[in-house]
Amino acid sequence: MLLPDKQTLARLLSHYRAHERAVLAQPHEPALRRRFEDTAYTLCVLMGERTAREAVHAAERYLSRTRPTVRAPLAPAASPPSPTG
């Protein structure tokens, strides 16, 4: 499965939240609602989800994951010096 670019997804999620607030403030403004619905649709497509709520949750989970770091193998532990006597 292809995963979206995290910066692009973060920006889109930010736009979604801003449009959501704008629609809640002015629910009868068709242009605001259209932008909000367009952003929600894009989130659904990017995240492969059927509803905006699922897409937002999936995007938040995806953005919260960090990439696994590749660790170099540890050097073998040095053995303690043997007592000579």
Image (cartoon, helix red, strand yellow):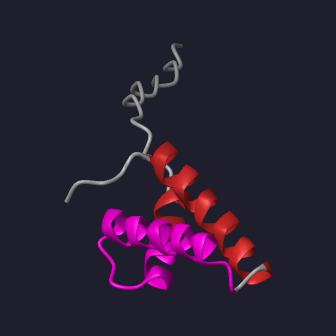
Judge by depth and name the residue closer to the eye, 76 or 74: 74
Q: Quadrant of the N terminus?
A: bottom left
Judge by depth and name the residue closer to the eye, 22 or 54: 22
Instruction: Please report the residue visible at 35 percent of the width from the left and 67 percent of the height from the top.
Output: 47
Instruction: Please report the residue visible at 46 percent of the width from the left and 62 percent of the height from the top.
Output: 62
35 within the magenta span: yes
Outermost residue toward the top in this view: 85
The kind of secondary structure the magenta stretch mainly shows is helix
Outermost residue toward the left in this view: 1
- Left or right for 73, reference 82: left
Judge by depth and name the residue closer to the eye, 15 or 5: 15
| Image height of 83 relative to 13, above or below | above
Q: Position of residue 49 (x, y in %)?
A: 33, 78
Which residues are drawn in magenta?
28-57
- Left or right for 33, reference 28: left
Q: Position of residue 33 (x, y in %)?
A: 58, 77
Q: Position of residue 57 (x, y in %)?
A: 51, 76
Q: Position of residue 64 (x, y in %)?
A: 56, 60
| Image height of 44 relative to 1, above or below | below
Judge by depth and name the residue closer to the eye, 14 or 75: 14
* Res. 46 image quadrant: bottom left
Outermost residue toward the right in this view: 25
40 within the magenta span: yes
Instruction: Please report the residue visible at 56 percent of the width from the left and 61 percent of the height from the top.
Output: 13
Instruction: Please report the residue visible at 39 percent of the width from the left and 65 percent of the height from the top.
Output: 42
* Res. 74 image quadrant: top left
Total marks in image: 0
